[in-house]
Amino acid sequence: METPPRLYMTWIAAFTSLAFVGTVVVLAIGGRPDPAALRAVAPLVNGPWRFHPGDDPRWAAQNMDDSAWETIDLSAPATSIDGDVGLPNYVDGWMAHGHPGYQGYAWYRRDVTVPAGDRAWDILGPTAVEDGYELYWNGTRLGGSGQIGSSPRVVGTRPLIFPLPSDATGTRGVLAIRAFMQPGSDAAPNSGGVHVAPTLAPRPQSEALYRVQWWRTIAGYIVEVVEPLAMFALIGLALGIRSRSSQPRFIVFLCVALALSAVKRLDNAIVSWTDLLSLPTYVWLNNVLWMPLSLCAWTWTWNRWTPRRSPAIDIGALFLTALGVLAGVLRVATMTHVFRFGMLALLVWIALRIVRHGPMRGMAMVTMLSILVSQYTGELGSIGIPTIWFPFGIGVTLTQYVYAWAIPLLAVLTVNTLRFRHHSVP
């Protein structure tokens, strides 16, 4: 027995509502400020730190003379947040403090007094560092983010907690941070090193604050999980109705485009929540594979919405995609611009063909425009259009907002092809 389109629409509405409500709840939880009661006993180790570019393992030692080093203040304005997740207490990196363009190693040091008493103390690592770090107490390595040293492997910085030695209570020691910024990274004028000061906290408040930090980190990338899951669900729906659809070829390429876009978005959460992807691998995958291939897949998808596809558009997209992949490998920005604007020209050509010959023109054009915006938010940002907002204090990008609209639209458009079989492709 065939499922009627109306029932599909009910499922789409229910799934969309559930995803929306769940995402809003996580954003609201993650966006809450650090509880005042926790911060009262768990202060940031901010203020002036001694700073020195370069690398020498001896700089971790407690008795090392750092009096000639520079000073960097890690105190942040009360309203300061980073421009991505919305992490609080964000400060500019070393490039904004006299070291423009510098990439590589640098050290931070400062004296820290651990209160006396019978409580155990932890250091909560800095939640924003470019790109990896190691934390030392009196010359002893406590841990760090990623692997730095002879063969660096940097990963996304996330909340980490490091127990201080039991004999640290009631003493004054030296906290040192060995930071590493991957050479060749894309850098802003305020990039480099530590952006959020670490925290000194007693247990169990340290563990509670650690959970708060993780909620914020999860909220910062929850959309990058929910939307890929919705894309995979749409792939299942599309494949389920393909045999009865008026647009079977469109559906095949739609599934490919959705799969590539889902993986591209999911990588953002993977690199931010786990160590599975190093930052250079993440950048390489995005620039060399996911970005050019997904844009090509969307172009080929929409080229199959009209009764007859244009072979010239397919060939042009294939040629431009090869250029885009090569541009990613060689890291040539001019070639990337040619690829992206060439694809944009092809998509505009497709839109004109849909207006003239495509079925369900109004819905198809609105849906295609939504997908187009999702692929070109960087270009929109370059002309002054805002590309990120902070509902509940957590960053949500223009791409994420557009996909939240485009995925249900694509689902409705796909289901509606069941009602237009007389438009089927020969």
Image (spheres, grey):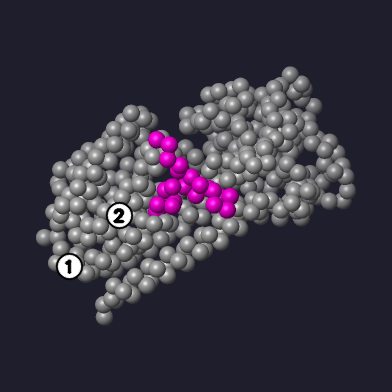
**Total label count?**
2
At which x and y percent is residue 398? 44, 47
Please tell me which residue lies in front, 123 or 379: 379
Please tell me which residue lies in front, 267 or 350: 350
Q: Is residue 178 above or below residue 116?
A: above
Helix, strand or loop status at disc 2? helix
**What residue is disc 2 on?**
366
Residue type (three-letter) at the residue carrying disc 1: Arg
At which x and y percent is residue 12? 37, 68
Q: Is residue 58 left or right of residue 253?
A: right
Residue type (three-letter) at the residue carrying disc 2: Val
Checking the image for residue 421, the label placed there is: 1
Determine if the magenta segment contains residue 168: no
At which x and y percent is residue 255? 30, 57
Residue 193 figure quarter: top right
Q: Earlier in the sequence, mark 2 or mark 1?
A: 2
Which residue is at 47% across, 62% downward? 20
Q: CA distance from mark 2 to mark 1?
A: 21 Å
Please tell me which residue lies in front, 247 or 207: 247
Viewport quadrant of the N terminus: bottom left
Region rendered in magenta: 383-403
Determine if the magenta segment contains residue 392: yes
Which residue is at 60% across, 42% downward? 81
Viewport quadrant of the C terminus: bottom left
